Image (tube, rainbow, N blue to C red):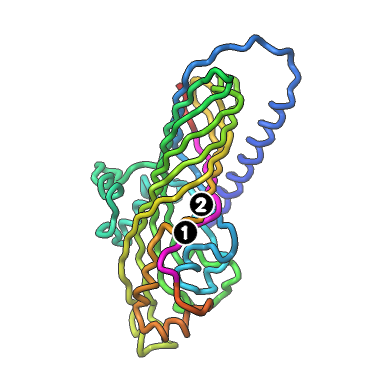
Amino acid sequence: MVFNHFVRSLFLAVSVLILHTTFLYSQEEEPSAPIESVGAVWRIGFWEIMHQTFSSDEDHPFYQMTGTNRFKGGQGFFGFTFLDPGTNGIIPNVQNKNDDGHKSKDRTLTKLFSYIPLLNGLPPFSLEYILPTELNVGVSLSFAHTNIWLDDETARAATSGADPSYATPLIRMASYFYMFSASLHPFGVPASDDIDIFLGFGLSRVESTIRYGIRSNPAIVDYAPVTQTELSGSTGTMSFRRMGIASGGDSFGFMLEFLFPGNQEIIDNPFSSNTIIDSTIYDATYNNRGGSLPSKIGMPGGITRLSWTFSF
């Protein structure tokens, strides 16, 4: 827990430092140097820290799925997606998913990449190809892969207090994002000493697996004498907007990237068709929203990615 707080503080501090450095760079008033032609650039992003937020308190995927107020305004994923110093896994989110027994519900690409030796999955990374144009702006095409792991223990709203754990439906979700995007670089292809600013649009294939259920609950002991769970999986397509800044150059640097998912319904909600227990009892015990639960849900909001890069 202390490590997570330290990483979160470091993440915010680095983000502010990057933005401040960019502002100072843009304010420099040095004599203009001759414009130097820059060719195409490849940029690889790796070892990312990711922070997921949502557009409103009611947009948390677990709140949409379960209708339970303990997820209203809940937290998204935050942390390393590769080589997390606080865990033993090389790809910690993949390790969490496999330990929770989701493998039988993996979708096509996730299942394919699970055969990679040792890693058991595709490491999060990005690959971008930036091209110059005759209009002195750059354009790029990129592919990025990342993943998240959410569980009801860490995703609960801070206001949930000391309520017993059985008051919350059991839910753990792994999501994999395979993202293709096109971006505009208004100041051209970044040279060695440049700061690159970019914005664009893209589409992502989202593959999700979910373990869901009801914990042993003494309040409804006739329906939940023991913990009961099931597994589900789904695939969806999500649009997103992209913007950010990165360092130029022919070596290592950084990239601070903001992704804004659209409002598409991309994840099948298993609770809509199977509440594990009688739906009337479920609604009376857990569903604070009233009415039927949606069959599919989205995750509108934002994903911030801070990663190291290598350009060549």
Mark 2: which secondary structure?
Answer: loop
Residue 113 or residue 117, whichever sits in front: 113
Q: Residue at x 27, y 47 (%)?
A: 114
Residue 300 belongs to magenta span: yes
Q: Which residue is mark 1?
A: 298
Query: On screen, 303 above or below 174?
Result: above
Disc 1 + disc 2, Cβ < 8 Å: yes
- What's drawn in magenta, residue-wise? 294-308
Q: Residue at x 35, y 90 (%)?
A: 222
Q: Which mark is residue 81?
A: none
* Position of residue 92 measured from the top left corner of the image (x, y, whole percent): 39, 50
* Position of residue 140 measured from the top left corner of the image (x, y, whole percent): 48, 29
- Magenta stretch mostly in which secondary structure? strand
Instruction: Give the mark nearer the N terminus: 1 vs 2.
Output: 2
Query: On screen, 24 above or below 302?
Result: above
Using the rendered view, name the quadrant where residue 254 is placed.
top right
Of all residues shown, which one is farthest toward the front?
134
Residue 104 or residue 130, whichever sits in front: 130
* Position of residue 269 measured from the top left corner of the image (x, y, whole percent): 39, 66
Q: Which amino acid does the dot numbered 1 rest on?
A: Gly
Query: On screen, 144 above or below 62?
Result: above
Report the quarter where the C terminus lies.
Answer: top left
Using the rendered view, name the quadrant where residue 235 is placed.
bottom left
Tell me the crowding category of disc 1: few under 14, some 14 to 19, or many 20 or more residues within 10 angstroms, Cα based: many
Mark 1: which secondary structure?
Answer: loop
Q: Which residue is mark 2?
A: 262
Q: Residue at x 53, y 37 (%)?
A: 200
* Position of residue 188 measured from the top left corner of the image (x, y, whole percent): 57, 23
